[in-house]
Amino acid sequence: MKFDTISIIGLGYIGLPTAAVFASRKVNVIGVDVNQHAVDTINRGQIHIVEPDLDMVVHAAVKEGYLRATTRPEPADAFLIAVPTPFKDGPTGSHHPDMDYIESASQAIAPVLKRGDLVILESTSPVGATEQMAAWLAESRPDLTFPQTHGEASDIRVAHCPERVLPGHVLRELVQNDRVIGGITPKCSEAAARLYKTFVQGECVITNARTAEMCKLTENSFRDVNIAFANELSIICDKLGINVWELIQLANRHPRVNILQPGPGVGGHCIAVDPWFIVSAVPEEAKLIRAAREVNDSKPEWVVEKVKLAVAEHLMAHPDQTVKDVSIACLGLAFKPDIDDLRESPSATIARRIASLHPGPVFAVEPNIHELPVHWDTTLVLKPINEALEQADVFVILVDHKEFKATPPSRFAQKHWVDSKGLLAHTAKQFAA
């Protein structure tokens, strides 16, 4: 099986870098996305997301003719599906996995499939999603055979290979990280491994589809539980009057202790989402995983309460003002430092919540975006950091962007602040969240 042409379905934070890396290896890549703006931007050799160095790789790939984008799938030798898997209401509550995007992608590529093609689900998915995708493909193409019914003799190979990259380092980690590859059959796994070895320098580790799906969910659940410990610790320390940042620094001097840093919650389309897929599948058994999710999901509202206290402290120090006179600046909206990704971001949730509650001006400082999403329908006003530092009375540090790290703590002097990231950990105590 030769992979002369590869199609990537979904050109977002994972799909576009993956397409670019394949194209940089002189493989013909057809990127498919329903977003016409994204398609047009890529075909100009530009990018619609923020990821270091991606712009140069995409520009070169488009210029050399190895990458182009379209809104409609075309024939290829391998199809990689990298579409969202959000939540929807289900029998176990509001955290039921939504497979609609995967189903739509399956139906979109089905008409152009041919004998010998490989289909890989990269989207982080609940256990059983790859088999479900194969069933949808089989339903749309009864003239072809699939591995769930014809095993190794199937016309189409189907596998799951979850991405495991860190935003801000995607290009490097796509190449260097090991890949877990789970085919519905061994031949499916072998075909997928051969494809990824086009650029992967790490090891391609073979397993079955269900184990590969569970592996990604397990990795992110492990991280979520550890973050929840740090976040709960920060709440406990606040109650006991202890500097949590100093405490963690001291505790981590133990040779077998490595506590993570607390924050305003957990964001992104992986850690904030994936554990719920396990809980949804086995709600009675996933007790610790559910508890960690609840701790992290509750942290944003705890930060909001700290902001209310900071506003009250400001008003006590300025009795001539009313609450409408107090301006608040929220520093950071992305779910992690130095990227533009707002998906499942607790920082964005906090900023929008403050804007909905506070009758005075509320500013958002996010150096990685140029405008707020139109669907937010919020009173938030996007401002550059220098303007916010001059105009705001209360600061809420939500993301440790490099621009905020470079801001001297003295700029916050005579201000009230809530620090959820520990940037001002050694400054006179205000409300360390």
Image (spheres, helix red, strand yellow):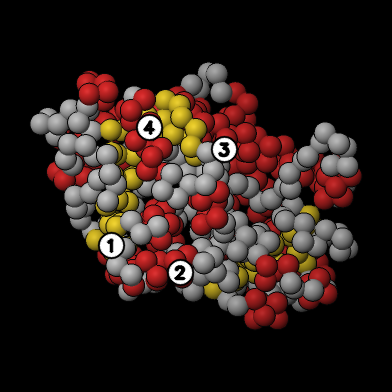
Give the mark, 4 or 3, whose residue is nearer the N terminus: 4
Q: Residues within 10 Å of mark 3 (few under 14, many from 20)?
A: some
Q: Position of residue 386 (x, y in %)?
A: 67, 80
Give the mark, 2 or 1, whose residue is nearer the N terminus: 2
Q: Quick one: 304 or 154, which is closer to the camera?
A: 154
Q: CA distance from mark 4 to mark 3?
A: 26 Å
Quarter of the image for residue 392 reads: bottom right
Residue designated by label 4: 190
Residue designated by label 1: 69
Tag 4: amino acid: Glu
Give the mark, 2 or 3, whose residue is nearer the N terminus: 2
Residue 55 numbered tag: 2
- Which residue extends farthest left? 143
Residue designated by label 3: 220
Kindly check if marks 2 and 3 are in contact, taking CB atoms under 8 A apart as contact. no
Give the mark, 4 or 2, whose residue is nearer the N terminus: 2
Q: Nearer the viewer, mark 4 or mark 2?
A: 4
Tag 2: amino acid: Asp
Residue 83 visible here: yes
**Residue at image location 83% in from the left, 45% down from the top:** 248
**Residue at image location 65% in from the left, 76% down from the top:** 385
Kindly check if marks 4 and 3 are in contact, taking CB atoms under 8 A apart as contact. no
Q: Nearer the viewer, mark 2 or mark 3?
A: 2
Kindly check if marks 3 and 1 are in contact, taking CB atoms under 8 A apart as contact. no
